Structure formats: structure tokens, C-alpha cells
Image: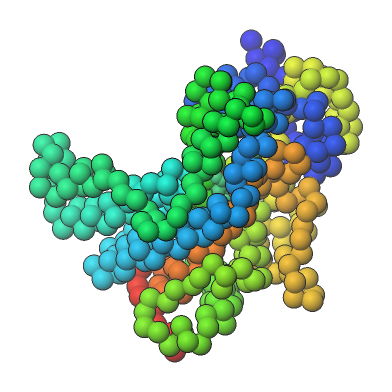
Amino acid sequence: MFSKYRFLVTCHPKNLEYILKTNFNNFPKGENFREIFTTLGVGIFNVDSDTWRLQRKLAHAGLVLGEFKALVANTSRKVVEEQLVPLLAHAAEEGFCIDLQDVFSRYAYDINMGMIFGRYENYLHIARLILYYRNIVPSFLWKFQRLCRIGSERAIIKAQKMRKDLLAGVETDDLLSIYIKALSDNGSIFASLARKDNYLKDEMLNLFLAGRDTITSALTWFFWLVLTTPSVKAKILEELNSALSLARRTHTWPWVFRPDDLKGLVYLHAALCESLRLYPPLPLNRKYVVKKDILPDGSVVTPGMEILLSFYSVGRMQWIWGEDCLVFKPERWIAENGKLIADQTSRFVPFNIGARSCLGKDTAFTQMKSVVAAMLFNFHIEVVEGHHVCPQQGTTLYMKNGLQVSVDKRTVD
Ligand code: HEM
């Protein structure tokens, strides 16, 4: 039974380059992929060939538009300032421990609702209510209240239903609007997509998941690495301190960073790349073989075979990264002249490489930088002693037990 399933697992950068770039057309996602990921429907992650080309063109036009980038920057800043910082301040005041993975997943949910649908679920606000009520009453009581939909739990259920406009008073150009506009133009090359059953619904779901799960995972592992490597944390803080203009540094707590403050920060960018190298949010990529081929390392692949590309392993190979391959060392991304090493070779693959590389890379860095700056600069965060960190098996690299931390307000001398 198992002999029918033929597959090859590889993490050799030359093989990856060949499969994802040089001979891309011979390695589509394939039917098995679509059978496994039926929930993605006809969205961009689940299609190949000409359909994929057209969908990518539209996604590219949507995600790289100037207006959309501005929306991402504004939305990130707003969710961070109005939701994330107050939530952490509340935890600090009340002395609660919080699960950062849960907080990031709510942050990513809120921000994606804003970016994609121009709407706002306010999940961080809900988290705040939950933190407060569920910490001061015995657990049987809040569980009973939830069951009967009474008291504070009723408020939480109501809050979950609440929707309000994220950028009231600010012109929005969310992805859904961009797509509707493109699809309803009969003269446009995208008009054929509008005739595909469920296209818009599936595409929005794909884009939502693309941004939510990856950002949650990336931020959670990044914080764990930084919080447990004091020398890196100190360097990031030093860089943030110099990025904050004098006028705003003398301001009172909390200190706020604008997206422009964060753009040129070399060390912060290097630390994010280094964390993504060790913990790529999407650890595996799957490809199908159309025609017989020989990979650069000599492996022969035949029609119908599946190839698993281990992005997780590429980042951890001693022969690729050197003896300190398992050490969290942002310095490896910085050249002697102090500039970032733009590592475009096939050894840095968390965003995929080649024709199907991530279209949200810039968006992801904008979001992550605004969270990291606000959290590290305004709070002392520590991993709870004895908390066991380990990866959870899955298509996205989550932490099995979340990331429990304690939070305190930080002062700046
Ligand atoms: C740290 C955050 C992120 C990481 C590590 C990441 C990684 C990846 C990877 C590995 C792929 C290839 C997936 C595959 O071939 O099956 C991909 C594709 C894609 N990503 Fe991201 N991503 C991130 C954030 C985002 C964000 C915020 C968006 C925007 C909403 C986004 C949009 C996309 C899209 C549209 C594709 C599909 C490209 C295609 O198939 O042509 N990503 N991403």
C-alpha cells in the first residue's frame, strides 16, 4: 500500500534552486496537494499553471500597490498603539502572565481583517476582557457563565460579535475592494476569474491565512529567541533608542515608533531574518514531478513522485551555515560595512524563492517591526521560568505549549 507513495525529501540549496526556479514548470503543486488542502478551494495557494499565473498577477497588483502598503503601515501602527500596548500594560498592572502566541494570533487576526476586509474584529480587546475576568473568578464560575451566556462572559461573547471600522476617517484601500474593482471591470484580463465558482471567497481566505498564521508563528519564535539571548535584545534596544527622535524620546510612556523610524534598522532586520532562518513559519513545501528529471545532487525523480522541500532543515545545516548554525546570531546578516547582506541565494528560503515566492514579504516585515519595536521598547518581558518551549508538528510551525511570559513596564534612563 505504501509502495505506491513515492517521495523524496531534500534540503540541498542547489536542488531547491532547480525545483523552485530553474525548472519550475516541471514541479507544480499537483493534484495530491489540492486533495489534501481542499479547504483552500481555488485560492492562490492551491492552483497551478495559467490559472495560478493570472491569480498571482492580480495578487501582485493588489499587494504591491502604494495605497495598500500605506494601509498596512497605518493598520499595524493603529492595532499596536490602540490594542497591543494597552493589553500588555493591563497585564503588567494586574501582574498576569500571558501567552504571547495567543496574543500574536489575535494581533494578526485584527490586522488581517483591517488589511483584507477593511474591518476590525478587535480580538485584542476581547483578550483583555478574558484576561481580567477569568483571572479574578474561579474557573468553574466563568465556565458556567459562558455556558449560560451571563455576566462578564456575556460581554465577551457580545464583544466577539462587535465589528467596527478600523480606519474611521482614513481612506481605506483594502484588498477585497481592490479585487472587487479588478473583477468587475469586464475589459480587464482578470474578468475570467470572476466567473470561477467561489473564486473571491477562496482567494480572500487564502490571503487571510497567508498573513495570519505566518506572522503569529514568526513573532512567537522571534520573541523567544530574543528574550533568551540578552546580548541580542540589548543591541535591538540600542538601535531602537537611536531611531526614536529626541523630541519623541522625551515624551512620556508609551513610546511610539512610526513605520518610517523602523525602515532603516539594520540590526532589527537582521534579527528577524535570523529567527526566520531557524524557525521558518512554513517549514515544508511540497512539489509534484511531471517529467523524469535529474536534480543537481544526482537524485533521479520520475513522473508522479512527490518532493518535500524542508525549509526547516535548510536553515540548520552545518555545511551551509557553518559550525554555529544553531546559534541565534543576527550578525551573520550584516556585512563589514555595516549594511545588510542581501542574501538572495537559495539558502534563505522562509519566504520561498523563485516564481512562487511570497508576495507579502514587505508587508510581513512592516507588521513584525512595528510589534517588536513597541513591545521591546515599552516593556520588560520575560519567559516564565520552567515554561517548556517545543515546536508543534503541523503545516505552520507553532509552539506546542504557547509562549508564557510575564510583563512589566519599562523605563528609559
Ligand atoms: C513572516 C511572514 C510570512 C512568511 C514566512 C511567508 C512565507 C511564504 C511562503 C513559504 C510561501 C510559499 C507557499 C507555497 O508555495 O505553498 C508564501 C506564499 C505567499 N505569501 Fe507569504 N509569508 C509570510 C507573510 C505573508 C503575508 C503577510 C502575506 C500577505 C497577505 C503573504 C502572501 C503570500 C501570497 C499571496 C503567497 C502566494 C504566492 C504564490 O503562490 O504565487 N505572505 N509565503
Q: Quadrant of the C terminus?
A: bottom left
Q: Is residue 251 above or below residue 75?
A: below
Across and down, in percent, residue 312 comes to 65, 45
Residue 219 spot, x, y in % from top left? 51, 56
| Residue 144, image quadrant | top left
Q: How many marks?
A: 0
> Which of the pair 172/297 is nearer the observer?
172
The residue at the point 63 percent across, 49 percent down is 64
409 w.r.t. 57: above or below: below
Of residues 67 and 138, the one nearer the viewer is: 67
- The percent position of residue 356, horizontal first and vertical second, equals 70, 38
Q: Point out the quarter of the image occupied by ligand 1.
A: top right
Residue at the spot x=64%, y=43% of the render? 61
Q: Is residue 104 visible?
A: no
Q: Quadrant of the N terminus?
A: top right
Side of 131 where 224 appears, left or right? right
- Towards the viewer: 306 or 257: 257
- Kindly tell me whether residue 338 is visible in this rendering: yes
